[in-house]
Structure formats: structure tokens, C-alpha cells
Image: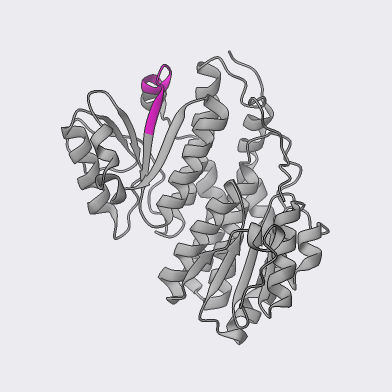
């Protein structure tokens, strides 16, 4: 199959969409960042589902690594189903939703605001119900996204979280790294992951591994394998996989390990080599592992906190093509639709 899909068109728009967010939402990010700085929270919470929850996990690591402030994910059903108020006075509460429409997320953001939390909405629609429920809104500026699989809105959701962290912490290095992202995203679109596609064209399952912010991206990748390629994928921390799941890794079991130039890379490489030693077909997005681990290309000289996000852009180009190699249209995943409304 070789058709022009909505997903492919939107993946190719990622560099432009990122540049648009950095330009048009800069003021909103600065205001929200200043509000967090004035509050000086000891706790942050996130409210999200699906790909948006993976963006929230990415923000969790950014907050904890940059500021030492813990971030907890709150289940929307606590407010929408169980009607239980949370004690969030003095905390920052961030809701992430591409559409900003899902009733459970909207209700949780209303509840956290009533509970005294500083509420921030991250959404592609500045007039969405979730945005109206919050004190601050960071519009994603991604433009229309019609493909079922979120790509450019996911990237901009992570970008929004990183930009918020950079402004909150007044981190000049991270600000500069974010400004470099549109160009790095364009370079990522040219990365050739065909060796992995050759291995997965007929595969039935795989593991995706990451550490730190890379674990948030491994979660996103595993979801995309399922929804676009009908391929069962499980995401694990490169440490957690050794606590049981490694027992399933035998001859020719495929593993995608995400390595970036940060403090976790030596451990990710060690896990990749151990699983390869068990007979797995291991692919690693970094150099430095011994044979038979296969190195996949990635963009060089990227800030450690933004490098996993650059990886997902290369992955999106790869996964759209892999779906077609497997005879599937990634725009038509069974039983899914663009906006999922939950209560």
C-alpha cells in the first residue's frame, strides 16, 4: 500500500507547527510560567488521557529534573465519576487535551480550580471547555489535525510543557534548545529507520524501552504501534523490563530501545546488550552498543531534555510508512475516532 494519508501530511507539518507555537504562544507561556514562579509550588498534578497523558509524563520528568518538584498524574474519574474533591491548594494543576472537550478532564480541571490549584490548560482549541475552566491556557497552534493518530498535537503538547518549564525556571539553555527544535524536527524527518521496518513488517509484538523523558516517548510509541499497525507493543522503563518482562524475550523477539545523550544512556545500552544476549533483535537509537544491537540514526547534538521529543518525530515518519507496509491505512484504525469523549 502506498497512499497519501492525512497522518503523513500532518507529520510533515511538525516543524512548521512547532515554530508556530513558539512564536504565537510565547506570551501565554511567559504569563503561566510567571504564575508558577510566584506560587513556588511543592507539588504539581496533571490530568490527561492517551497521547496527552504521555505528554504529561514527559512534563513530569522535566519538572522533577529541572526543579525537584514532584508531579503526579490524577485520574479524571476522581471528579467526574466519584465526585471526590482533591486538596490541591498551592499546587499547579495542568490539563492536557488536544480537543479540550472530554467531560471527565473538564470536570477535573474545574474541581482542581475550586480546590485552590493554579490551573493551566494545554489544548489545540483556545476556546475549548477545558480552556474556559482554567486560569491559564497554552494554545498549541498546531492547526487542524484530522488524522485519528495524534502527531503534531502531541509534539506541541510536549513542547508546551517544556516551554512552560523553561519560563518557570528562567532556564536560558532550555529556551535556546526549544528555539532550535523546528530545524531539528526537520532533520529527524530524514532519519532512515528501514532496518526496523524490515524486522517489524511481519511481527506480532515488541517491547519499546526508555528512561526518564525517553520513557514518556516509549509509551507514545507503543500506543502508535497498536493504533496504526495493529502491532502489540508494550512500553517499559529500560530498568523495569528486567524485573519480569525480560523473561519473555527469547530468539528474534523485537525490541526498540530509546537512547539519548543523557545520564541514563549507559544503563539503556547495558539493557539493550543484555536482551540481545538473550537472542532478541534489538534496535537502539544511539551509538555505543556492541553487536548484534542495531543502531538507528538520530539527530546529533540535541539538548538532553529535548532529544526524546526529536526522536518521536523520526518515529512518526517511520510508523506511518510501516502501517502501509503492513497493508493498513493509518487514517482508519478500527474502532477508533479522533475525539474520544469519556466521563
Q: Residue at x 51, y 17 (%)?
A: 325
| In front of the other: 315 or 172 | 315
Residue 174 vertical placement versus 244 (above, below): below
Residue 28 belongs to the span the image colors magenta: no
Q: Residue at x 19, y 39 (%)?
A: 273
Name which quarter of the figure residue 24 lies in.
bottom right
Is 302 left, or right, of 71 in this rendering? left
Is 102 left, or right, of 19 in this rendering? right
Residue 146 vertical placement versus 239 (above, below): above
Is 228 left, or right, of 217 in this rendering? right
Task: Count numbered badges in the picture.
Answer: 0
Q: Residue at x 38, y 53 (%)?
A: 301
Residue 138, how many percent across, how many down? 70, 63
| In front of the other: 131 or 91 | 91
Colour convention of the picture = one colour
Image quarter in which the N terminus is found: top right
Residue 8 vertical placement versus 213 (above, below): above
Q: Residue at x 72, y 74 (%)?
A: 113
- The residue lying furthest to the front in this view is 82
Name which quarter of the figure residue 304 lies in.
bottom left
Provide the residue span drawn in magenta: 198-206
Residue 94, how many percent across, how many down? 63, 66
Residue 125, how many percent across, how many down? 78, 54
Q: Is residue 37 visible?
A: yes
| In front of the other: 215 or 45 | 45
Q: Is residue 139 visible?
A: no
- The residue lying furthest to the right in this view is 127
Residue 204, how many percent across, how many down? 41, 22
Residue 202 belongs to the span the image colors magenta: yes
Amino acid at each position: 500500500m502506498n497512499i497519501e494519508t492525512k497522518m503523513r501530511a500532518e507529520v510533515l507539518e511538525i516543524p512548521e507547527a512547532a515554530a508556530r507555537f513558539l512564536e504565537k504562544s510565547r506570551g501565554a507561556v511567559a504569563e503561566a510560567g510567571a504564575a508558577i514562579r510566584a506560587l513556588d509550588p511543592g507539588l504539581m498534578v496533571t490530568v490527561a488521557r492517551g497521547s496527552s497523558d504521555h505528554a504529561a509524563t514527559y512534563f513530569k520528568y522535566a519538572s522533577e529534573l529541572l526543579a525537584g518538584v514532584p508531579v503526579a498524574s490524577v485520574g479524571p474519574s476522581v471528579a467526574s465519576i466519584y465526585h471526590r474533591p482533591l486538596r490541591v491548594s498551592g499546587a499547579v494543576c495542568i490539563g492536557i487535551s488536544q480537543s479540550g472537550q472530554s467531560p471527565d478532564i473538564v470536570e477535573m480541571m474545574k474541581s482542581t480550580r475550586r480546590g485552590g490549584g493554579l490551573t493551566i490548560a494545554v489544548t489545540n482549541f483556545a476556546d475549548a471547555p477545558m480552556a474556559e475552566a482554567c486560569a491559564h491556557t497554552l494554545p498549541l497552534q498546531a492547526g487542524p489535525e484530522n488524522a485519528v493518530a495524534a502527531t503534531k498535537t502531541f509534539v506541541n503538547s510536549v513542547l508546551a510543557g517544556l516551554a512552560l518549564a523553561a519560563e518557570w525556571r528562567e532556564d536560558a539553555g532550555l529556551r535556546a534548545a526549544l528555539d532550535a527544535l523546528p530545524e531539528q524536527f526537520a532533520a529527524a524527518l530524514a532519519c532512515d529507520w528501514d532496518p526496523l521496518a524490515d524486522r517489524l513488517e511481519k511481527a506480532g509484538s515488541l517491547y519499546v524501552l526508555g528512561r526518564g523523558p525517553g520513557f514518556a516517548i516509549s509509551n507514545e510509541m507503543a500506543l502508535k504501534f497498536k493504533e496504526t499497525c495493529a502491532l502489540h507493543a508494550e512500553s517499559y522503563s529500560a530498568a523495569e523490563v528486567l524485573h519480569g518482562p525480560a523473561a519473555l524475550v527469547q530468539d528474534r523477539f523485537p525490541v526498540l530501545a530509546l537512547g539519548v545523550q543523557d545520564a541514563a544512556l549507559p544503563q539503556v545500552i547495558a539493557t539493550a546488550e543484555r536482551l540481545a544476549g538473550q537472542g532478541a533483535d534489538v534496535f537502539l537509537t544511539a551509538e555505543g552498543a556492541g553487536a548484534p544491537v542495531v543502531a538507528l540514526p538520530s539527530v546529533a547534538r540535541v539538548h538532553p531534555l529535548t532529544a526524546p521529543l526529536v526522536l518521536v518525530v523520526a518515529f512518526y515518519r517511520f510508523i506511518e510508512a510501516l502501517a502501509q507496509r503492513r497493508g493498513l491505512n493509518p487514517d482508519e484504525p478500527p474502532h477508533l475516532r479522533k475525539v474520544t469523549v469519556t466521563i
